[in-house]
Image: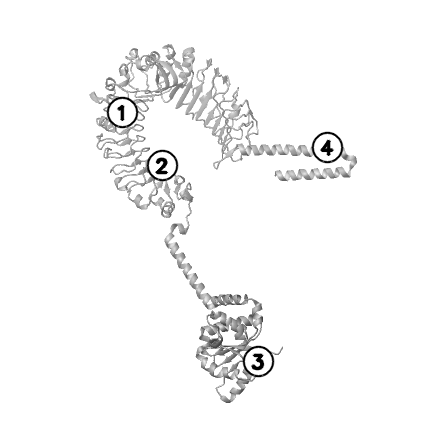
Amino acid sequence: MFEFCLFSFIMTTAKLQFAYKREADTVIAVRMRLLAAKKSMIIFMLILAQGIEYSRTCKCDQNFFCNCSSNQLQQVPKVPANALGLDLSFNQIVSIDINDLSLYIALTSLNLHKNKLEFIHKEAFKSQRNLKVLDLSLNNLKNLFSSWFQELKSLQQLNLVGNPYSTLGPASIFQSLINLRTLRFGSPWLRNVHKNGLEGLTHLEEMTFIGSNLRSYESGSLKAARPIGLVSLSLQNLFQNDPELVSKVLQDVSHPKTLLTIKDVTIRTSTSTEPFKATREGGTKSLSFQNSSTSDEAFTSLLQVMDGSHLSYLGLKDVHLVGAGWWQNASYTHYENLHTVYICNLDIQGFFEFSSMTQLGFLLTHLHKVSVINSTVFVIPRETTFLLKNLEYLDLSQNLLSDLTIEPTLFTGFGAYQNLNTLNVSQNVLKSLGLMSHLVTNLKRLIYLDLSHNSFVSMPEKCSWPATLRFLNLSSTKLHTMTACLPSTLTVLDLSENDVMVFNQRFPQLTTLILTGNRFMKLPLGELFPRLHTLLIQRNALRMFNGSSLRRFKNLQYLEAGNNNFVCSCEFVSFFKQDVGHFITLRDGRCNYVCDTPFTLRGYAIESVRLSVFECYMIPAVSVLCSVIIIVLGLIVVTCHKLHVVWYLQMTKAWIQAKRKPAVGRLAEGLRYDAFVSYSQHDAEWVEEILVPELESAQPSFALCLHKRDFRPGRWILDNIIDSIEKSHRTLFVLSDHFVTSEWCRYELDFSHFRIVDEHNDSAVLVVLEPIKKETIPKRFCKLRKIMNSRTYLEWPEDEEKRGEFWSNLRAALQRDEC
């Protein structure tokens, strides 16, 4: 297109210049037209450049999702009309006009997070009836309008967080979003909240509200048509500054079916806990604090306020706790329903001054599930473990437990941990696997045990385990040798990310084995795992596997063995592409199975490898090739023999050598003989006793050249033949059955044939000594056969009366031509 427009511009310029030359009186008009053409061209090039910019900044994949994020765009770019997803986050877009999105009627996801949006036309989303996800967070929208969402009947997720609108409502902003599931709204700029249409949302499942600087709140504003599954509130200092307002908010969102999360708050005094009375009255069963700060005093007050509630779950994540751990004032409270406590990333100021947890005995005795993750726990005193009689689940991962402190922590005396079925002590500083096996032996109901990310290094020869243990995680524990220590009762065993090379222990009940990230060079023996259903052995040193190794697994259905060092031999490639699906399902996808060797195939997916016949069947292929070559060579030899190719080559070589002799020498010697006599040794008697005397004693006499008499001794026979023929006026062939079978006679006949062809003369004289068929003369001497067919040759007569005539004709044939 660009080349075409440039060509048009050049042609227009040329025409105008031509007109300029022809019409001097219209110079000004021509210049104006030329200027207009240049302006049009500049405008077109700017539009073209803008189109090129869009095509470079937006990348659309095969799922019709277009990523235009972080490209400094100032307006909505043009993408394919069939786009399903459009990511415009982290750009500089200020406004969305009525036609910016009108073409994209199939759009289901639109992300405008972190732009500079100040204006959105009231009908900007009118065409997006299929839109399910809309993110307008962190922009500059100072007002929200219900007209934006009027046609978004399919919208399920809406994010309006971080915009500087100060008032929400009283118009029903969200009432038309009848299928909305997730709503995030509010900001530090929000001051006033009115009823805004949430009461009409019957499918709302999750809501996030930010009102850290809220000044007024109309009761019922955050109350939906039915209980919301998950509500997250970020109210910061409102618990201390305006507890009454917080009470109104909590009253609207509290419900037994709602998981309530309080974020970004500071609760240090008993006064700041008063709003939680609304939570208790609303019947809240699940309460979490995230990214907050509190004290033991405030927490004790919270327990007093929530006393008698239906609270069953309490969560603390990223919480900073101040105090010495004095909980006595809450010791009379009743939390029989509180069964689960989740603590993660708890930071205790003055940790080493913190008192024992025994003062929380009124809570601990009722707990069934406890998680204390990444909270610098190094021991649980025995006095505390006595209180954990009902505990079923204990997660102490990412802490500071050691071999020294794990013993009192897992003390099982006086009925402690009698109901424990799940224990997670991963990512601690444990070093003795034998000690751990001994400590958990008394956990008679233990089913799940996670010891991953510790430093066991070695494994003892024998260990004791509870008979109920079914799931054991020993991943990333630096193990390099397997022994009989592991319990044979397991159904799931995770040994990933170790240095194990061999696995020979039998597990009759094992259904899932995870060996990812080890050093296995081949699959373990299937006979050891008669019930194995799933095997994960990615990122090892596997070279290949085949039907024989997989057939040993009686019940194996799923295999994940990608990202290994596969040798792409013909057998393995063929098996992988054609037969592996008959044995198992590759759950991690075939694209992860890549060749490592040979080097020419490294990095190629096995599925795409195409090996030649020679690479796959080298010995048979070479054998067949050699056989073919031998057959072809044999055919060539037979053909050359039939066509007398070798003879032609030999004769050509000899004749060329003869022709290369100095011509001066040949001319000086001249013709010494009247005839060179070519005959078989079997006919020597006739030649020497009859032919030679008759011709050499005739008047005038004939000088004959005989090989017996006139060939020079010590000279190459072929040279003698060529030299004698060249020095003879005629070549006299005495033909008989013996002649056509004589090798030297054939040579003499061959060189005579060359002479006939080369000098274009008829120097050959044929004498048939005995009846001979013409067919017996070699077919390759077509010229001689032609002579016999076109001229009269002499036949030696049996009748003596006719011999006089024979000699007369022969002398005439040998007579030299007169100059």
Q: Which residue is mark 3?
A: 815
Q: Are marks 1 and 2 in contact (CB under 8 Å)?
A: no
Per the model, the C-alpha gap separating discs 4 and 3 is 106 Å
Going from the N terminus, do you reach mark 3 or mark 2 first?
A: 2
Q: Is residue 50 left or right of residue 156?
A: right
Per the model, the C-alpha gap separating discs 1 and 2 is 35 Å
Q: Which residue is mark 4?
A: 32
Asked if 400 appears above or below 804 in the picture, the reply is above
Query: SS class of the residue under badge 3?
Result: loop
Q: Nearer the viewer, mark 1 or mark 2?
A: 2
Q: Residue 563, how many percent across, how many down?
A: 38, 38
Q: Which residue is mark 2?
A: 539
Going from the N terminus, do you reach mark 3 or mark 1 first?
A: 1
Query: SS class of the residue under badge 4?
Result: helix
Q: Nearer the viewer, mark 3 or mark 1?
A: 3
Q: Residue 763, how many percent across, how many down?
A: 55, 75
In the rendered image, the residue lying farthest to the right is: 25
Kind of residue at badge 4? Met
Q: Nearer the viewer, mark 3 or mark 2?
A: 3
Give the quarter of the figure containing the C terminus: bottom right
Going from the N terminus, do you reach mark 1 or mark 2 first?
A: 1
Per the model, the C-alpha gap separating discs 4 and 1 is 90 Å
**Label drawn at residue 772:** none
Q: Which residue is mark 1?
A: 392
Q: Residue 325, how many percent across, how many down?
A: 31, 13
The front one of 703 and 359 is 703
Kind of residue at badge 3? Gln
Toward which corner of the image does residue 602 lie, by quadrant?
top left
Query: SS class of the residue under badge 1?
Result: loop
Can residue 227 be seen in this snapshot?
A: no
